Image: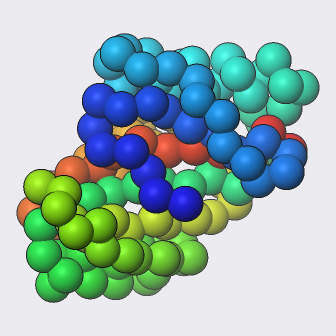
């Protein structure tokens, strides 16, 4: 599944691994909190690790490969694909079972923003399974 470009709808994986639109037109930090609130509304225990997917976008395949390599070395499962016609046509999806909660979500976002910037890209958004 492709992630929407920055500023487009945010999505979250539900128990059937389908995605539902949560919000658009909010700041990244507000999106993070909305994801966490939605997870809790679905009965998720934020203290437990869950399938988390982060989406990063890059202008070139080489940049996407460099970002992917760093993420893979950190233990993430990586999928990358090209979206022709987009300003940043190379998308990298990084997935791992992680615990993301109100105490660490800011650091989580910073880590992905910094990695994307190191490789000339942008961190778009993230999503999480509610189980």
Query: Which residue ends up furthest to the front in the rendered image?
Result: 85
In which quadrant is the C terminus drawn? top right
- What percent of the width, then of the height, locates residue 59? 12, 67
Q: Is residue 57 left or right of residue 78?
A: left
Q: On the image, which quarter does residue 91 sit in?
A: bottom left
What residue sits 49% from the left and 77% below the top?
A: 78
Q: Does residue 128 lie above or below 44 as drawn?
A: below
Q: Front-most of 21 and 117?
A: 21
What residue sits 26% from the left and 59% below the top?
A: 57
- The figure's colour scheme reads rainbow
Query: Which residue ends up furthest to the right in the rendered image?
Result: 43
Q: On the image, which quarter does residue 124 sit in?
A: top left
- What percent of the width, then of the height, locates residue 70? 33, 77
Q: Front-most of 121 and 74?
A: 121
- What percent of the width, then of the height, locates residue 118? 14, 63
What residue sits 12% from the left and 55% below the top?
A: 87
Q: Is residue 87 left or right of residue 75?
A: left
- What percent of the width, then of the height, locates residue 12? 64, 39
- Answer whether residue 108 is visible to the viewer in this image: yes
In which quadrant is the N terminus drawn? bottom right
Q: Is residue 84 left or right of residue 21?
A: left
- Answer whether residue 118 is visible to the viewer in this image: no
What residue sits 49% from the left and 27% below the top?
A: 32
Q: Does residue 37 lie above or below 20 as drawn?
A: above
The mark tally for this picture is 0
């Amino acid at each position: 599944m492709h992630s929407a470009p920055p500023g487009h709808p945010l999505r979250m994986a539900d128990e059937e691994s389908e995605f539902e639109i949560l919000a658009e037109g909010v700041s990244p930090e507000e999106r993070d909190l909305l994801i966490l609130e939605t997870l809790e509304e679905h009965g998720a225990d934020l203290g437990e690790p869950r399938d988390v997917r982060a989406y990063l976008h890059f202008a070139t395949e080489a940049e996407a490969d460099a970002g992917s390599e760093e993420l893979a070395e950190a233990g993430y499962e990586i999928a990358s694909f090209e979206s022709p016609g987009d300003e940043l046509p190379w998308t990298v999806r990084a997935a791992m079972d992680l615990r993301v909660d109100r105490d660490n979500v800011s650091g989580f976002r910073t880590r992905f923003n910094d990695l994307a910037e190191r490789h000339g890209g942008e961190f778009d958004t993230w999503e999480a399974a509610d189980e």
